[in-house]
Amino acid sequence: MKKFFLLALTAIAAGTSAFAGPNTKSARISDHFSSAFKNAQNVTWTTAEKYDQASFTVGAQKVDAYYDTDGELIGTIRGMDFDKLPQSAIETITTKYTFPEYRLTDCIEFTDRASNTSYFVSFQNKKDTVVYEISKNGRLKYFATR
């Protein structure tokens, strides 16, 4: 689900960014990462066509930071427990997506470069996977079906 979600975000980010040279991009990413994630440990980098990804831990929590083709931060993704979502979202979800028909497959927190936070959950049944975005106030918004 993270890759599916990230591809949607990078498509938006790539459409609004110009291409920086490799040295500029690397320096920009390195500078931002070292200042924004000072407590990062066990850092590994992955480069894809439209983004660079840093996977690391802060304390015991796994975090992924994504950078666009200009070397600008797209956002960060952290796994989270379902019971930490806003209560109103939990009530709506557990009413509509009941177990065992639906199984929770992912629950993540996404924080964009402007520090806006939202949550994404995905549920799988026998046919497909449904993804919802949840605002900080608990409002659900359909995101995708795969």
Image: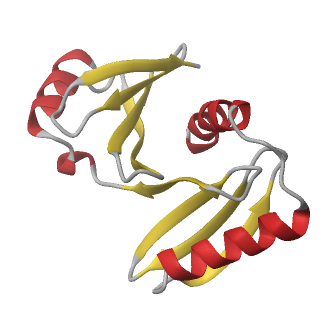
Which residue lies at the image location 29% right of the left edge and 32% below the top edge? Answer: 134
Which quarter of the figure is the C terminus placed in? top right
- Front-lying residue, 101 or 69: 69
Res. 101 visible in picture: no
Instruction: In the rendered view, tell whether residue 109 sits above or below residue 130.
Output: below
Q: Tally the numbered discs.
A: 0
**Location of residue 99 in the rendering, given as x and y in whole percent from the top left corner:** 28, 26
Instruction: In the rendered view, tell whether residue 145 sits above or below residue 66.
Output: above
Instruction: In the rendered view, tell whether residue 51 sits above or below residue 134.
Output: below
- Front-lying residue, 84 or 24: 24
- Front-lying residue, 37 or 87: 37
Which residue lies at the image location 36% right of the left edge and 23% below the top edge? Answer: 102
**Location of residue 78 in the rendering, given as x and y in whole percent from the top left corner:** 43, 58
Instruction: In the rendered view, tell whether residue 52 sits above or below residue 86.
Output: below
Which quarter of the figure is the N terminus placed in? top right
- Front-lying residue, 25 or 80: 25
**Quarter holding residue 123:** top left
**Location of residue 110 in the rendering, given as x and y in whole percent from the top left corner:** 42, 48
Q: How is the image coloured?
A: secondary structure
Res. 60 visible in picture: yes
Which residue lies at the image location 18% right of the left edge and 48% below the top edge? Answer: 83
**Location of residue 18 in the rendering, given as x and y in whole percent from the top left corner:** 79, 42
